[in-house]
Amino acid sequence: QKEKLNAARATMPPKVPQGKEGKNAAAAKAQKAGKEGGGKAKKKKWSKGKQKEKLNAAVFFDKNLYEKLKKDVPNYKLITPSVISERMKCNTSMARRALKDLELKGMIKPIMKHSAQVIYTRALAGAE
């Protein structure tokens, strides 16, 4: 029986002492295993995503902006509130109001009207 007991002891790994020293030793062993190639891989970090640069858009029409709008917009082929907002650097709500005003003055003509999107084009002088 003594021989069997000695054989069992020879194949079993040594006990890790419990307490602070035992935990530190176990942590060091796990860290060593990670460096050698095995163990857990680093957790994938989520990217923050691409953020669009904030546009500093005008909220009111000043005299210069309105004159520029009246001069440039009637020459565009495709006129929508989003196009005006982007090119003139103003709010889309302002662009919608300005387009209604230009339509009343006869400078642009509507192609399609819908509650969500209105599309205009330039009013040709010879067409009327």
Image (spheres, rainbow, N blue to C red):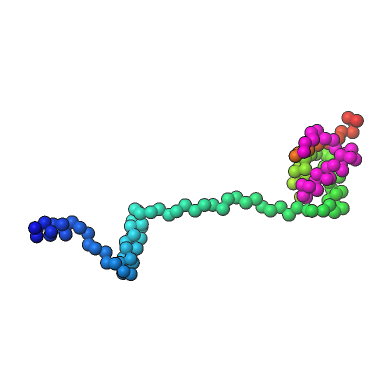
Q: Is residue 70 magenta?
A: no
Image point (74%, 46%), residue name: 86
Q: Nearer the viewer, residue 27 or 102?
A: 27
Residue 52, compared with residue 23, is above or below; it is above
Residue 72 visible at all: no
Q: Nearer the viewer, residue 73 or 39?
A: 39
Q: Position of residue 18 (x, y in %)?
A: 29, 67
Q: Position of residue 95 (x, y in %)?
A: 80, 46
Image point (65%, 50%), residue name: 52
Number of marks in picture: 0
Q: Quadrant of the N terminus?
A: bottom left
Q: Report the side of 103 relative to 58 (left or right).
A: right
Q: Nearer the viewer, residue 118 or 90?
A: 118
| The magenta segment | 90-115
Q: Is residue 96 magenta?
A: yes
Image point (85%, 49%), residue name: 66
Residue 76, compared with residue 4, is above or below; it is above
Q: Quadrant of the C terminus?
A: top right
Residue 10, compared with residue 125, is above or below; it is below
Q: Report the side of 119 relative to 31 (left or right).
A: right
Location of residue 15 (image quadrant): bottom left
Image point (85%, 54%), residue name: 62
Q: Position of residue 43 (x, y in %)?
A: 45, 53
